[in-house]
Amino acid sequence: MSKSGMQLRKLQLEGSKKKDAILEFYNGLNVVAGASDTGKSFAYECINYALGATDIPEIPNEAAGYEWVLLEFVDKRSNQNITLKRSFLESEKANVYYIYSDIAHLKEANSETLSVSSNSKNSLSSKLLMICNCSYRNILKKSSNGETEAFTFRKFVYLMMMNETRIVQKNSPIYIGDTKRDRMSTKETASFFTMLTGLDYQKFNKPESAEVKKAHLKGAIDELTLICGDLQKEISATEGTLDNYESQQSDKVIKKIEKSLSDQRQVVQELEFERQRELSVIDLKVREKSRISDNLAKFKLLKKNYKSDIDRLDFIEQAYDYTGQLVDMKCPICHTPMKSSAQNNQIYYVALNKEKDKLKAHLLDLQETIDDFESDLLEVTQQIAKEQEKIKFYERGLEDQVKEVSRMLIEHERYLKIRDKALAIENNKKKLLDANSRILELNERIDNTKAASDKVGIKKLSDELMLDFCEIIRDLLEKWNFINNIDQSVVAFNTKANDVIVCSKTKASYGKGARAIINSSFIIAIMRYCIQHGLSHPGFVVLDSPLTTYKEKDKLKNEKNEEVDKSVKSEFFYNLSRIGRDMQIIVFDNEVPPDDIKEIAYHHFTGNPVIDRTGFVPINQ
């Protein structure tokens, strides 16, 4: 078995409430054959889709409801089972899940999410190319200007998988389409050449006349002359704005200004520190003033209350005097005479006087306290005013410093521009000197110029390589009974069409059935050649309908026969069943292989739900 590449193991479709559709594959020849419309071409397209095709396969009615396609294969380098899982939904088709497991053990396996876009950092293409030990990077895209594009895994796919349309085309199998324009596709030709040589795209040079080379050199000289003129104008214009300053002089002034700026910043920091300190002091004073004001207000309120109490006692005393002057009267109830006691009156007046004396003493003490608070409040207010003056002093100092710093910054910016202009002049003078030196050098090269080469071309495949490749095709066609072995040069390579000529006839002169056989041999030969010569290749080929008979009506006389001879069909299966364990061929076809072939993995689709397997998609869901 080859030490790199892939061996397909299983194709499986999954969907909720759907029975899995499964096809298993093995080494060597695998044939999926039987009736038409049983899902063979759909299975082919599912393999292609899992390997990174852009478009979702056209899903037949019986496959509606399937959500995922899974393709299990073996990484031959490590013998690791890998499963590719991709959604049929348009919104999710951009990604492929790369799972390190066979399909039976997906849940517990590690996985990566890869992009089908080859431009992505984590792309499916780069992963599969690594499995194939493929280090090709570029292929030629346009021969007119040497433009290249990346070599991707899809370049392999086009040369190892052929659907029922491409397999009968008249163009070379290396081209995707069958039009004349397709034959002009440089990148497809380059991909084929890269696969057979094992080399990235390489340019080769075509001779060019000395006159043309001199013209190129003169053009370069003219361009450099224009550059010199522009540089000289720019130097003169800049020198007029510098007042004869040099970059070294500007550096000295800039350093002096930067030193002054540093000193000014230090002064600003000190002033700001003092200002903040005074703000802290004044904050404490303001709090003290607020406390004194609050206490003073409370004591003044207490003084007011004391005065109110004295006035109340005076009122009570006066009212008592008035009531004492009233005439004695009898009690309206018991008619007993009501008489005031002189002794009681005397006690009442004594009590009132004592209470008033007590309040007046408190009022005297309270007034002294109020006087102290008012004195303290005045002192604090004066201190606050002094601190505010200090703050204004520091703020004026800061304002002056800011103005000075702003002035110095403007000056600093001016000298920076002067220095930059001076440096630009020095650089332009150096460029001017280099350009003039280059002009002298180019003039010397013009005098010594001979024929040179610098045009883009395509490196052709060697005759020896193409002989080996055509020999593999001849061997296949001969063993399939398509040609006999009388003429050893019966298969030749047409370098103009990049296709084979069989029995001195171009492929386009054969019918569809014969073209399918020739194209199949071409694709299989690419795989065999690469493996025999240790070149990168996935290691498998998938063919759709290489043997299907095209017999739609009776033919007129001398009309091309579209059918493939029965003996060719049989020998096709016999020969490919012995292809070898290091290669894998998967054939989807209506033709059934002979019963006596043993070394073959065979799936037969009956198309009849009562006879064995109906098709790719299970009928009884």
Image (cartoon, grey):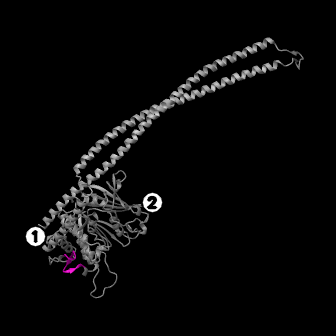
Judged left or right of residue 374, residue 108 is: left
The amino acid pointed to by label 2 is Lys
**Tag 1 residue:** 447
Judged left or right of residue 452, residue 315 is: right
Could you say which is closer to the camera, residue 98 or residue 531? 98
Q: Callout 2: few (<14), some (14-19), or many (20+) C-alpha neighbours within 10 Å?
A: few
**Residue 534 on image: x %, y %:** 18, 62
Considering every residue shown, the one lying at the far bottom of the view is 557
**Screen quadrant of the N terminus:** bottom left
> Which numbered disc covers residue 403?
none
**Tag 2 residue:** 17
- Front of the two marks 1 and 2: 1
Query: Which segment is the magenta one?
Result: 494-507
Q: In this orientation, does residue 528 appear?
A: no
Secondary structure beneath label 2: loop
* Res 326 quadrant in image: top right
Considering every residue shown, the one lying at the far front of the view is 243
Total labels drawn: 2
Magenta stretch encompasses residue 477: no
The amino acid pointed to by label 1 is Asp
* Res 223 quadrant in image: bottom left
Magenta stretch encompasses residue 501: yes
**Residue 154 on image: x %, y %:** 29, 65
Q: CA distance from mark 1 to mark 2?
A: 83 Å
Q: Residue at x 69, y 17 (%)?
A: 355
Q: Residue at x 27, y 61 (%)?
A: 7
Q: In this orientation, does residue 55 appear?
A: yes
